[in-house]
Amino acid sequence: MIFSRILAALFFCALFAVPCHAIETGVRELSLASPEGGRRLRVTVWYPAEPGGKAVLVGDNQVFKGAPALSEAPLLEGRYPLVVMSHGSGGRIQGMSWLAAELARAGFVVAGPNHPGTTSGNSTPADTPKLWERTHDLSFVIDRLTTDPLWSGAIDKGRIGVIGFSLGGAAAMEIAGARANLEAYARYCDTYQTWDCAWYAGGQGYVDDKAITVDKVDLRKIDRARFERSNLDRRIKSAVLIDPGLAQAYDAQSLKEIAIPMNFINLGSAGTIPAAVIASGLAALSPHGSYATVAQADHFSFLPECKEGGAELLKSFGEVEPICDDGSGRSRADIHSELIILVREALLRTLKERS
């Protein structure tokens, strides 16, 4: 075990051409004004850092455990791949800190926005299928970080990847080149009426952390041209897609034309993965696709570890989903450890330094 860690450390130092000593995780919060629709993005950036700054727990709240990082720590000198991240529907980017912090320690600059309209406390069914807004958010984050004086010198513009979970996985699919088919998605919801489809039919949303009554969403009335358009950003060179949403709605030909590595991960074993996110067929259609599963896990296993009493607190708020229950007896910390290895190795393999 010690020997393998030494080899991994030596490999990292050679791959990213950085000083080979203890690497901290730095974190900074940015507020960016996007030109599309006046969207203001709250962006979190995790990065390889020198010691310094203020010790914080990113994403820590009454329910979930946060991940340690150093706020405003000095950026560790070097050139690193950039990885943009997209959170799930009704989530927050800070909830992916358990993964982002480890990737920063492995030599990546990691950045993700809270997507307006589909973020915890500010999420509506009408905004949920607007993947073109999410992909624009991700492209805009790339634009800003690769031109900003603080970050541009530390980012290798030829090594940019994307990670997405659930609805964020759908955004990552599209920015990598996949195109969705609106009628296929509507037919899927006609049949299953669960998961995201139940959300569209529920008549409830959230604005400013308050529940509101909203119209039910008729998917067939969505702007078809926008829903089915290409949102490809050719700067993306690798994608990691964890339980990607809209799994039944992608145009097969668009998947066959994707030229970059597509690393699919499903939470659960064969036979337990919901149709809404099953990705084995997507991987098979992608020319450079790979597929892995994480046994004894479920969709909620990707969320941060819950604190003691977190499940009871959620129930008191009216939450009916088993957000803190992984359903198998396997700890969420153990599941996260496996996911970190899968994601980190996929990115190290596919975003190697160009000669």
Image (cartoon, rainbow, N blue to C red):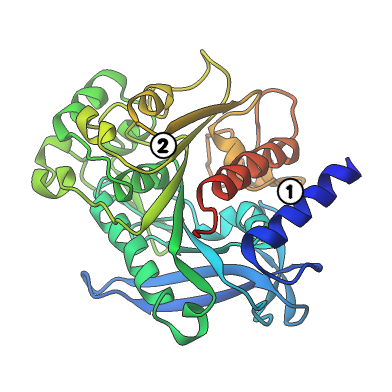
Mark 2 Cα-neighbour bin, 10 Å: few <14, some 14–19, many ≥20: many
Q: Secondary structure at mark 1?
A: loop
| Residue closest to the eye, 233 or 354 | 354
Q: Residue furthest front?
A: 355
**Res. 254 image quadrant:** top left
Q: Is residue 149 above or below residue 1?
A: below
Mark whose residue sits in front, 1 or 2:
2
The tag on residue 244 is 2
Can residue 118 be seen in this snapshot? Answer: yes
Q: Residue furthest right?
A: 2
Q: Residue furthest top?
A: 271
Q: Position of residue 330 (x, y in %)?
A: 74, 28
Residue at 33% over, 63% down: 139
Q: Is residue 13 above or below residue 125?
A: below
Residue at 43% over, 23% down: 280
Spatial distance from mark 1 to mark 2, Cα to Cα?
Answer: 26 Å
Mark 1 lies on residue? 307
Callout 1–callout 2 Cβ contact below 8 Å: no
| Residue closest to the eye, 62 or 5 | 5
Q: Position of residue 306 (x, y in %)?
A: 69, 46
The tag on residue 321 is none
Q: Quadrant of the N terminus?
A: top right
Task: Look at label 2 and name its amino acid.
Answer: Pro
Q: Position of residue 69 (x, y in %)?
A: 71, 68
